[in-house]
Amino acid sequence: MPKLKIYVHYEEESVDKSKHMVIKFYVPKKWKEGPVEKIKEFFVEEYNKKHPDNVLVLRNVRLGRKVGAPLERAKVKDCIQNYDDLYVTSKPDTNANTNASSYGYDDRGLYVPNPPSPPKNDTRRKDFDERYSRFDNIVCSSDDDEECHPNIEKMTWRRLRKKQREEKRAQQEKRLEELAELAEVARAELDSSDARAVAEAKKTIEACRKEEISIRKVMKLTLEDVCKVTDERTMVSANASVREVPTATKKEDEAEALESFIKNYDSELIKYIECAERSYAENKEYLQSRPHLLCEQCTGWLLLRALEAEMGGDRGRMKQIVKQYLQLQTVMDLAKSTKKDPRDFIVRFFSNLDRDPKNREKFMVEVEDFAKKIQQRAADKKREEAEKRKLAEELGLDTEDGKYEYQELTKEERMGPGGLDPVEVFKTLPKAMQEAFDKQDIPLLQTVIANMPKEEAAYHMKRCEDSGLWVANRD
């Protein structure tokens, strides 16, 4: 059994503070099976040695916690825990000329747990006790705070006490099961013809019954034990109109969903960008009245517009769009992390920005950081387009109207109808034929072929047809 360290205080307000005293000591092992009265006797003896001018009379004081009944008659192991604070206080009306036992104390001055019964005509007190006695064993975690030592964190103490109650509850329930099995076996013996066995069975059943009653009497109850769900339902107003958020469910539907979204809410999106120059309160009201903007299609559209503005040289407008984008994206991220509707976080997000200037500063730092990413992406995109334009010009495509696209194909994708790669075939052609294909000059190609030997010309043209460089006119 672990050591039991306790603190015993004497801090009567009616006594001078110089007469107050605190003793901390380890309870001897042999005391743990005995009554708490032993601890009180020890404290009174030590106190009287130190303060002979203010002697404490054993029968005129009691020992307990700050709140609750005295503990003298209880066993130490049942009611005292490690690092408990106990208080020695004067008994009420100890100077009155009345019998101490009439106030719940015996002749030795010890507390009697069961106070005297009220007079027969005091029906109100009796009714009160009967009505509220069923709540005596109900335990709430907040009740543990009264016993918490000041050096222990309250939530840690609550968890510890809860664990102790659960362990004790498990032991009690296990014992009840054992008693039920024992009583069941004893009941089977009642049909025996042996009178002695029947008598023993009755004694066993009675003993099990009494022990079960005693266990249930002290068993602590939680709210889950005394409460139950009798009816559970969800009510939705008949006039409720919840607008679905338009979000693409499949990857192949994203382009179609974005096109449909822009078509339906183009004007609202433009007005939302204009809200960048307004207050956060106005932005909040705008989104509250248009919650359908809280979707992936809207944030995707804003990113495209921000990129276009930066590539067009309008950096100020790009930052405005980024600001509006981050407002939507932050609200959506908050909702996603908590698995709730994004509309629930509109007020919370903008209230945080309005309430604390530091929050606004942090948000604007995020805007600047994201704007730098847009600038980098715009520079990369410009470089990519310049490279594509250069390749298109090399291929002889018209780049003035911007309707061109260069895309490098794999070898398998380049294969012609005869199974040859046009790139490899082009490299094997005579330079004169390569020049004709580069210029797409058919008369020049015919002249080159006419000047070549017939077999060589047929060989090269056959390879051009198999690779797709030349499509013969079948007519």
Image: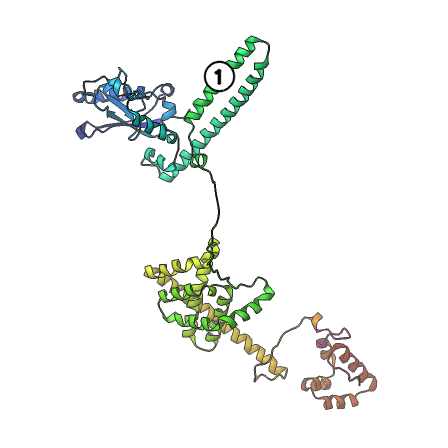
Q: Does residue 145 appear anywhere in the picture? A: yes
Quick one: label 1, few (<14), some, or many (20+) residues within 10 Å?
A: few
Res. 79 image quadrant: top left
Is 441 placed above or below 222 here? below
| Residue located 74% across and 75% down the image | 416
Residue type (three-letter) at the residue carrying disc 1:
Glu
Find residue 146 and report its horizontal and vertical position in percent: 32, 34
Closer-to-camera residue (166/26): 166
Specify whether 112 is left or right of 438: left
Q: Quadrant for the N terminus, please.
A: top left
Closer-to-camera residue (176/381): 176
Q: Which residue is mark 1?
A: 206
Which secondary structure type mostly characterizes the magenta part of the structure? loop
Q: Quadrant for the C terminus, please.
A: bottom right
Specify whether 129 is left or right of 443: left
Find residue 109 and report its horizontal and vertical position in percent: 26, 18
Find residue 299 and report its horizontal and vertical position in percent: 48, 66
Q: In the rendered structure, which segment of residues is drawn in magenta?
A: 414-422
Q: Does residue 451 appear anywhere in the picture? A: no
Closer-to-camera residue (201/121): 121
Number of disc labels: 1
Find residue 397 and report its horizontal and vertical position in percent: 62, 83
